Amino acid sequence: MVEVKILAGTNSSYLAEKIADYYGNPLCDVKMNRFSDGEMQPVINESVRGAYVFFIQSTFPPAVLRQPTLRRKNEPL
C-alpha cells in the first residue's frame, strides 16, 4: 500500500490535523520560510519519496465570522 503524507499550510493546520487523524497518520514535519515579498517556501524535513503527498493550504485569507444580532420580531432595525 502506498504511504500517504499530509502537510499543513500556515492557515489550514486545524483542517490538516483533522484529515491526518482520519487517515491515522501524523502530519509531516514541515517548516515554512517566508520571504519579504510575501512568498513562502515549504521545507519538508522528512522523506516523501514514493508517497502520495497532500499539501493542505487555504487559498483565501482567514474569514472573519460575525455573529448575527438577534432581534425580536417587532424590534426596529
Image (cartoon, rainbow, N blue to C red):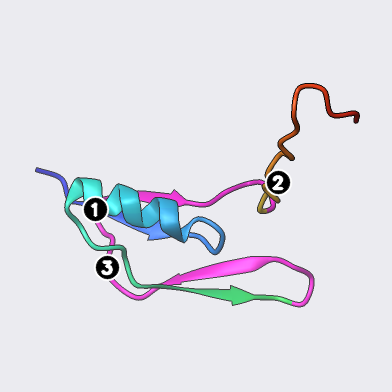
Q: Which quadrant of the structure image shows residue 25?
A: bottom left
Q: Nearer the viewer, residue 15 or 69?
A: 69
In the image, 46: left or right of 11? left
Residue 15 magenta-drawn?
Answer: no
* Span of residues in magenta: 36-61
What residue is rendered at 28% in x and 61% in y?
A: 48
Between discs 1 and 3, the one toward the N terminus: 1
Q: Which residue is mark 1?
A: 21
Q: Of circles 1 and 3, which is in front? A: 1
Instruction: Look at the numbered disc 2 and give the secondary structure of its residue.
Output: loop
Residue hosting label 3: 47
Tell me the tag on residue 52: none
Mark 3 is on which residue type?
A: Ser
Horizontal side, residue 25 vs residue 64: left or right: left
Quadrant where the C terminus sits is top right
User: Which quadrant of the structure image shows residue 17?
Assistant: bottom left
Q: Residue 48: within the magenta?
A: yes
- What whole-number distance in Å separates the C-alpha atoms at marks 2 and 1? 29 Å
Based on the displayed image, in which of its 4 quarters is residue 76 positioned? top right
Residue farthest to the front, as pictured: 74
Return the x and y of residue 41 as percentages of the image width and height.
57, 69
From the image, tell me which residue sits under label 2: 66
Residue at 17% of width from left, 52% of height from top? 24
Labels 2 and 1 touching (C-beta < 8 A): no
